[in-house]
Image (cartoon, rainbow, N blue to C red):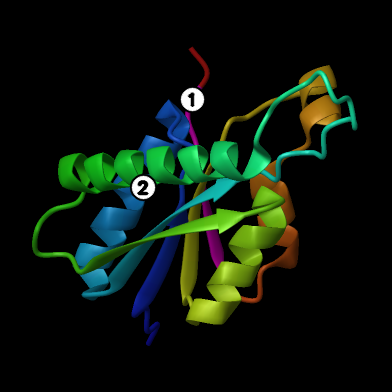
Amino acid sequence: MISIKNILCPTDFSEPSYEGLKYATELAAHFGAELTVLHVIPVVPPLPPDPNFVFEVPEYERALHLEAERKLRLLVEEWVPKEIKVHTNIGHGDAGSEIVQVAQDQGADLIVIATHGLTGWRHLAFGSVAERVVRSAACPVFSIRLPRK
């Protein structure tokens, strides 16, 4: 029998990721599993050493982190039923690699991830986080693709 006790659901706060969260909460309720909702903040590239350019990277990263915490809290309040034990997590770096690493670190039994369904040049230019997760994750990955409009 399949035992799913820990589900990881990454979100980028897009409509497809909300659909992924919907599936993740239904699976968590069905299996009595804990749910972790993860958002990954990309690394801010280093800035050119121009003395006339003032931009504080640590402050910017702190602001991104605080905003992600706020959005995750609101997302959980709106989308996750109270009877499901849920945690939030914020990662930093490459989204695909970070999702796989967090899943491994937390012993996730399943990753539920939405794909944006990019094709053609958009897929070549941007790649697919979901595709990288499917290829790299040690646990099963349930990918959700919204139908095209």
Q: Quadrant of residue 18?
A: top left
Residue pictured at 85% horizontal, 25% vertical: 51
Residue pictured at 50% horizontal, 82% vertical: 107
Describe residue 75's horizontal placement relative to residue 78 as left or right.
right
Q: Name above or below for residue 49 compared with residue 1.
A: above
Q: In which quarter of the image is residue 6?
A: bottom left
The x and y percentages for residue 148 are 52, 18
The x and y percentages for residue 31 are 25, 73
Residue pictured at 17% horizontal, 65% vertical: 84
Q: Give the residues drawn in magenta, as a range.
A: 140-147
- Mark identifier at residue 147: 1
- Mark identifier at residue 69: 2
Three-letter amino acid code of the residue under disc 1:
Pro
**Tag 1: Cα neighbours inside 10 Å, few (<14), some, or many (≥20)?**
few
Q: In which quadrant will I find the N terminus?
A: bottom left
Q: Residue furthest left?
A: 82
Q: Quadrant of residue 36?
A: bottom left
